[in-house]
Image (cartoon, grey):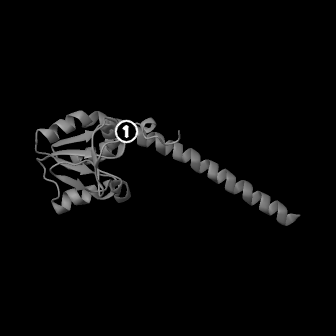
């Protein structure tokens, strides 16, 4: 019986600790969202259509994909100059390797725009002068019907209902 009480106490303690962690994550999530909102307010946003226009017009810019390698494998946006540098090492790559130049026009993007905004703000804080974030990330790009590239070629996405899947 004593062992049962100890085990029950242990289970209740672990459950309480897990519930506390969830609350802590909520606090972290709220703080992160606040930082993303502040970054988006400070960084110039570029729409998918405007970025495509830059591509068509051959405007000089560096497109920086800050997603993780596994995300990039699914597809990326093509431009004359593309750098695939995960957000976690962007500051080191920008500061130490010379991968980016201070006066270049830089467009940063991620999956939905949040990591891109934070990365763009970090670049601005490091002294890069002309930094943009792709508003809505690659999701917005694809939703606008613009092409993505992968190792298999160039593709445009179509609405799910047009694929014939799940009918």
Q: Residue at the right extreme? A: 1
Relative image position of residue 69 (x, y in whole percent): 34, 59
Residue at the image point whose x is 22% and y is 49% from the top: 78
**Res. 72 in view:** yes
Is 139 displayed left or right of 122 in the figure?
Answer: right
Quick one: quadrant of the N terminus? bottom right
Q: Identify the secondary structure beneath mark 1.
A: loop
| Count of numbered circles in the view | 1
Relative image position of residue 3 (x, y in whole percent): 83, 66
Is 64 displayed left or right of 17 in the figure?
Answer: left
Q: Is residue 105 above or below residue 89?
A: above
Q: Nearer the viewer, residue 59 or 133?
A: 59
Give the quarter of the image for residue 51.
Answer: top left
What residue sits right under mark 1 in the picture? Answer: 158
Residue at the image point whose x is 15% and y is 38% from the top: 54
Give the quarter of the image for residue 113.
Answer: top left
Q: Nearer the viewer, residue 34 or 67?
A: 67
> Crowding at label 1, few (<14), some or many (≥20) Cα neighbours within 10 Å?
few
Relative image position of residue 9 (x, y in whole percent): 77, 58
Q: Is residue 26 above or below residue 3?
A: above
Relative image position of residue 26 (x, y in whole percent): 53, 43
Q: Nearer the viewer, residue 44 or 165?
A: 165
Residue at the image point whose x is 79% and y is 62% from the top: 6
**Res. 46 in view:** no
């Amino acid at each position: 019986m004593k062992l049962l009480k100890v085990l029950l106490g242990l289970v209740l303690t672990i459950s309480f600790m897990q519930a506390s962690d969830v609350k802590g994550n909520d606090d972290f999530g709220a703080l992160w969202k606040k930082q993303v909102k502040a970054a988006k307010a400070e960084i110039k946003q570029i729409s998918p259509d405007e970025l495509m226009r830059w591509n068509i017009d051959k405007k000089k810019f560096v497109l920086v994909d800050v997603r993780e390698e596994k995300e990039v494998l699914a597809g990326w946006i093509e431009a004359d100059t593309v750098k695939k540098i995960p957000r976690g090492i962007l500051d080191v790559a920008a500061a130490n390797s010379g991968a980016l130049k201070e006066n270049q026009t830089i467009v940063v993007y991620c999956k939905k725009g949040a990591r891109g905004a934070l990365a763009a703000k970090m670049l601005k804080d490091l002294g890069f002068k002309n930094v943009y974030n792709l508003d809505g990330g690659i999701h917005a790009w694809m939703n606008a019907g613009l092409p993505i590239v992968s190792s298999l070629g160039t593709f445009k996405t179509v609405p799910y209902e047009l694929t014939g899947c799940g009918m």
